[in-house]
Image: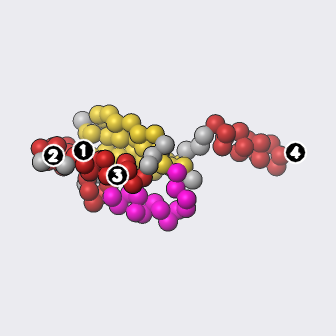
Amino acid sequence: MRIMLKVSIPVEKGNALVKDGTMGTTIGAVLEELKPEAAYFFPENGRRTALLVVDLKDGSQIVPTVERFFLGLDAAVDLIPVMTAADLRAGLDQSAKKRQ
């Protein structure tokens, strides 16, 4: 199941991590562990924000996935289920077959 994670880091926590030199290693460790299909970083509403697309094997992986952001970055995390174009086509084909 592909999930897009939107991770928003509070300014104060982000500043502290940048100042003590651990922001890069913290983000790097998370990326190494999650191995996202895509990762984008940008400012949003004055906060350091990331969009990561990860492929989770099952729903039980949600907890350890988001906890690393809660605990390590004090971040707010949104989870959004996403599909590839192939997933969408397969879903549309299944829907069309059910309607016949």
- 12 vs 82, left or right, is left
Which contiguous range is marked in magenta?
A: 55-68
Badge 3 amino acid: Val
Residue in front for this viewpoint, 49 or 39: 39
Q: Name the residue under label 3.
A: 30
Assess whether mark 2 and mark 4 are in contact (beta carbons under 8 angstroms). no
Where residue 53 sits in the image (x, y, percent)?
Answer: 47, 44
Who comes first in sequence, dot 4 or dot 2?
2
**Crowd class of label 3 (few under 14; some 14 to 19; many from 20; radius 10 Å):** some
Assess whether mark 1 and mark 2 are in contact (beta carbons under 8 angstroms). yes
Instruction: Determine the secondary structure under disc 2.
Output: loop
Assess whether mark 3 and mark 2 are in contact (beta carbons under 8 angstroms). no
Who comes first in sequence, dot 3 or dot 4?
3
Q: Name the residue under label 1.
A: 24
Assess whether mark 1 and mark 4 are in contact (beta carbons under 8 angstroms). no
Q: Name the residue under label 4.
A: 100
- 34 vs 23, left or right, is right
Q: Is residue 10 visible?
A: no
Q: Mark 2 points at which residue?
A: 21
Q: Is residue 96 visible?
A: yes
View extreme (front): residue: 32
Where residue 18 sits in the image (x, y, percent)?
Answer: 16, 43
Badge 4 amino acid: Gln
Badge 1 amino acid: Gly
Q: Residue at horizontal 24%, vertical 35%?
A: 46
View extreme (bottom): residue: 60
Instruction: Determine the secondary structure under disc 3.
Output: helix
Instruction: Determine the secondary structure under disc 1.
Output: helix
How many discs mark residues in the rendered view? 4
Of badges 4 and 2, nearer the viewer stands 2
